[in-house]
Amino acid sequence: MATPPDETDLMRATLKSIAKDLNLSHMTVSRALSGHPNVKPATRDLILARARELGYVKSSAANAMRGDPTAIVGLLLPNIVNEFYARFANTLALLCADSGYDLVIHLTNDEADREYQALARLQALQAGTVIMVPTPVAHPDTPRFHDHMRLIEFIRTRPHSNVVGRLIIEDAPTIAAAVDHLAHRGHMRIAFIGADESLSSGKDRAAAFRAAIAAQSLTDNPDLIRTGAPGFAMGRSQMEVLLDRPTPPDAVICGGFEICSGALDACLRRDVDLPGALAFVGYGNPSAYQWIVGGITTIDLSADDIAERAMKLLLDKTSKDEVRSPTRLLIRNST
């Protein structure tokens, strides 16, 4: 008969200690705790009861040493100041927990060295899958991680990367819809502020804007397309450049979450009449957008929907899919 656990028992709860307590083989205990069918029900119940008494927890490190997959998932984001990234991470963490996975989040600040160190730490933890927003430039040694973890690119892609999946935001049709919406309201000088075109997302969004301008037979003015390293400060500074032009734009479309926040900040600081002097189309849908100037028209995307699509990619360990998440134009007062 097993003895009641004391403090020392709780500290030393292992497969071997449970086997010794119950006078059973190590293999029998291991099989019972792993749900193996070749264990008598009464024996399994006894083992599970003792494991609960001792507070036994499976060791991920021990599983990894045996070659078993761990339940650790990595998530690499530039930051979580961005409301979209924060909401995505929150939803993905809950979905992972519901499926028996542990989500470990690292922030890269869009720096190659930070990304490399984060991947190295996740490899040390024996993470099976990593969902990552790739940094603009990869560390030269990053490719070695492809042989050890399943990497899924999120939002951006890097050329020649050997990833098992990609999760892309399908925003080109919505950017076109925004240009169409503005053109049909008489706007002729439509500007665009987006990420640097060295980034796949920045390149694709700028291309979608140019194609939409051409489709509306509007003048393609390169000075009205402002790009740079994505961020709040960049969005604000580029909006200020546009506002200081001798002939400012009469409308602007933003191509990024923090870029939009910065551009909007510049407009509000200068008390720009939205939409009287400038029609404004944002990106993402933070809760405050519904209140600013009676509502900000925006390219809306659901962080929850994208997290669910990411979870499906995570769980499907056989395919190499590119999953595209749709967006929509949410029209409000600012246009």
Image (cartoon, rainbow, N blue to C red):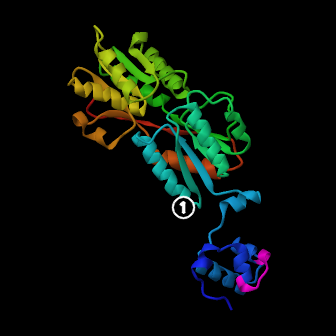
Image x and y of residue 59, in percent: 66, 64
* Nearer to us in this view, 195 or 107: 107
**Principal SS element in the magenta part?**
helix
Question: Circle 1 sits on which residue?
Answer: 98
Q: Can residue 134 be seen?
A: no
In this image, 107 relative to 218: left or right?
right
Is 258 in front, or is 155? 258
Q: Is residue 22 magenta?
A: yes
320 displayed left or right of 115 = right
Nearest the viewer among 15 and 182 is: 15
From this viewpoint, which residue is outermost toward the front? 8
Residue visible at 59% across and 31% down in the picture = 157
**Residue at 66% across / 49% down in the picture?**
124
Image quarter hosting the N terminus: bottom right
- Secondary structure beneath disc 1? helix
- Point out the image quarter for the C terminus: top left
Looking at the rendering, which quadrant does residue 252 occupy?
top left
**Identity of the residue drawn at 62% across and 30% down:** 138
Coordinates of residue 193 in the picture (x, y in percent): 40, 22
Q: Which residues are magenta?
A: 21-28
Neighbour class for label 1 at 10 Å: few (<14), some, many (≥20)? few
Assess whether residue 229 is covered by the magenta stretch: no
Residue 5 lies in quadrant: bottom right
Label 1 amino acid? Asp
When the figure is inspected, residue 226 is found, relative to residue 178, above or below; the finding is: above
Residue at 48%, 48% (x, y): give it. Answer: 89
Q: Tell me: residue 248, above or below residue 160.
A: above
